Amino acid sequence: MALKQNLMGTIWQKKGSWRMEHIQLTAPDGRSADSLRIVHPGSVVLIPLTAEGNVVMIRQYRLPINQVILEVPAGTKEWDEDSEICAQRELREETGYRAKRFDLVCKFWPGPALADELMHLYIARDLTHDPLPMDFDEEIETAEIPLDELVAMALDGRMQDGKSIVAILRAHAWLTNEKTVRD
Amino acid sequence: MALKQNLMGTIWQKKGSWRMEHIQLTAPDGRSADSLRIVHPGSVVLIPLTAEGNVVMIRQYRLPINQVILEVPAGTKEWDEDSEICAQRELREETGYRAKRFDLVCKFWPGPALADELMHLYIARDLTHDPLPMDFDEEIETAEIPLDELVAMALDGRMQDGKSIVAILRAHAWLTNEKTVRD
């Protein structure tokens, strides 16, 4: 990269979590441009799978788009928090379930143009009821939906949340492969 | 939503494009929390498909993760810009091709927790060489890769850019369906 990067300052700090930095880029010929970078502790995204083959999905209000949308459970890690510990905590907070088994499917960047956030996708199984309280500014309803129906929704455009589309299609491929190997 | 939202100010304005606003949320009991909202003109994400069945992918440096990654071409709309006009412009800037045919596959939110950005996914076909200059702070290389290989990379974890995983898997399903209907 021929552009020089200068950190100009932090323009937003989420308490105890990620921060947003202003970076100035300068080319060898002196032209410059402003850029942003979110420095993020990472996050988890979950496919909680019931014994019946349903995924525990959530419906949640999203302020930027001012509507309630269907999503897979997900949440931000604490700095230095183990991803699987975070996965259990977010699962209990958002769905009321605890899982005995977590399988890491993959890691991906939801928005590498702006943030270094790396999402860890887990399939969570052997679920039992064991809720944790939610944050006061979160309002979440759960809905248990067959995985095959969610795959259809991800492929035909009814599901519109990017990370949820990735999670459903990747987990479905992973589970199909697990089944093939086992059978 | 029981929380009251107050706009506290704009904390970042990308010249001529999106802005980031600070919103304060207040519960009926007086507790409050700070939130952000990116107000965004929307964007396009492209599957440029050659006559040979290859997708014209790009390799691009991403500052937040400090590495070059494999992605589908994409870009931000101008305010009030028609999505298909934007698709043609970004295609020419990033790949050097112009397309005669665009098919809109779906729309999705890459990050609705932070932004109202709606991505329009197009398949671009009937490609001819007709480049536009790139921005000086962009450095892009193209790579033409068979769609089937990209589907495998999206499903086995080699592809790690969220919007690219969505775009490849959705476009593949759309094209498979198109072929089924036509045959």
Image: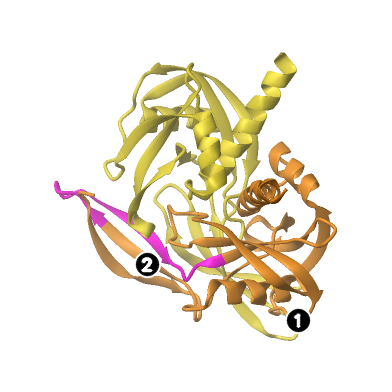
Chain colours: A orange, B yellow
Nearest the eye: A52 or A3:
A52
Q: Amino acid at mark 2?
A: Glu
Q: CA gap, disc 1 to disc 2?
A: 33 Å
- Determine if residue B3 is in view: no
Label 1 Cα crowd, 10 Å radius (few <14 / some 14-19 / many 20+): few
Image quarter in which the N terminus of chain B is found: bottom right
Is B162 on the left-hand or right-hand side of A52? left
At 43% across and 21% down in the image, what residue appears? B98
Query: What residue occupies the far front of the structure in this picture?
Result: A183
Nearest the eye: A78 or B99:
A78
Residue at disc 1, secondary structure: loop
At which x and y percent is residue A19? 43, 71
At 60% across and 53% down in the image, what residue appears? B116
The answer to if B177 sits in the magenta stretch is no
Chain at numbered mark 1:
B
Chain at numbered mark 2:
A
Label 2 Cα crowd, 10 Å radius (few <14 / some 14-19 / many 20+): some
At which x and y percent is residue B129? 37, 18
- Residue on which the image places disc 1: B28
Asked if badges 1 and 2 are on one and the same chain, I answer no
- Determine if residue B163 is in view: yes
- Residue on which the image places disc 2: A21
Total marks placed = 2
Nearest the eye: A37 or A76:
A76
At 69% across and 75% down in the image, what residue appears? A137
The answer to if A33 sits in the magenta stretch is yes
Residue at disc 2, secondary structure: strand
Is A169 on the left-hand or right-hand side of B102? right
Vertical relation: A141 (above or below) B164 = below
Q: Amino acid at mark 1?
A: Pro
Instruction: Specify start and end residues of the magenta stretch as a single range.
Output: A25-43
